[in-house]
Image (cartoon, rainbow, N blue to C red):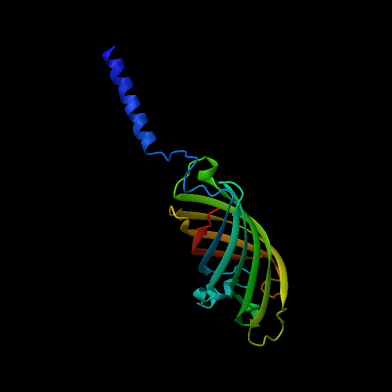
Amino acid sequence: MNRKIVLLAAALLTASVCLAGTPRRSPNSPYQYGKRFYIALQGGAMTTLSENASSYSANDRTWDRAALHGQLSIGYSFTDAFDIRISGSYNRPAGALSPWAGFYPYRFNAYHLFADVAWDFNSMAEFYTSFSPKVYVGVGAAYTAGFEAPEHPTQVIQEPNLVPGFRFGSILEFDGRSGFGWFVDLGFEFFTDWYDGQDPSGFPFDIDPKLSIGIVYHIPR
């Protein structure tokens, strides 16, 4: 009997410790953002995977493919776990013309507009904490123009271009009790093949992988 009591006490103690370290469900948590708007600003590094991108590496200029980007988003949380956002961004990607005729790198202006839906995993489980892992998917379009490239003997860059696209990514968000927070965003944007101004060939998309850090404010109701 004593052994059973000791085992039961140990089990209760273990359960108490586990529950104490588990985020508690609360209907009044400061990390519940349902029915609230938010605004986010972010920036970071990106590159473009498109026709002839490998020629940068072949000419020992791999890092020249990197570029900076910035994005402004306005969103609305329909529930604690689900929100939508509209995002506008700008970056200046790098491209290259046909390597068989020589190495002809260039850059261009790219303006992106996306509508995304996002899911917060912790809030889906009703665990409201300062840390929020999220995923998102979206559709949008890009406008590209302002190409700067040397004269090429056989190939002409087309501009301007308005192309459709889609994207997906993940966000790790860390919030304070006041509604302010910061986050890390890793995303991949896919555009149809005129994005970089070149005649489509090979893989049907031009891809922009992006890594950024940003700040967010969840506006009180």
In the picture provided, is 60 more to the left or to the right than 160?
A: left
Task: Note whether residue 190 is visible.
Answer: yes
x, y percent for residue 218: 52, 56
- The residue lying at 55 percent from left, 42 percent from top is 124
- Vertical comparison of 119 with 89: above or below: above
Determine the image quadrant of residue 208.
bottom right
Q: Which residue is most to the top?
A: 1
- The residue lying at 28 percent from left, 20 percent from top is 6
- The residue lying at 55 percent from left, 61 percent from top is 39
The residue nearer to you, when weighing 219 against 89, is: 219
In the picture provided, is 24 more to the left or to the right than 47?
A: left
x, y percent for residue 129: 45, 46
- Vertical comparison of 164 with 77: above or below: below
- Vertical comparison of 59 with 31: above or below: below
The residue nearer to you, when weighing 161 against 158, is: 161
x, y percent for residue 188: 59, 61
Which part of the image, by quadrant, shows the N terminus? top left
x, y percent for residue 33: 54, 50
Determine the image quadrant of residue 176.
bottom left
The residue nearer to you, when weighing 185 against 159, is: 185
Q: Which residue is most to the left?
A: 2
- The residue lying at 53 percent from left, 45 percent from top is 121
Number of numbered discs overlaid on the protein picture: 0
Task: Note whether residue 101 is visible.
Answer: no
- Vertical comparison of 154 with 163: above or below: below
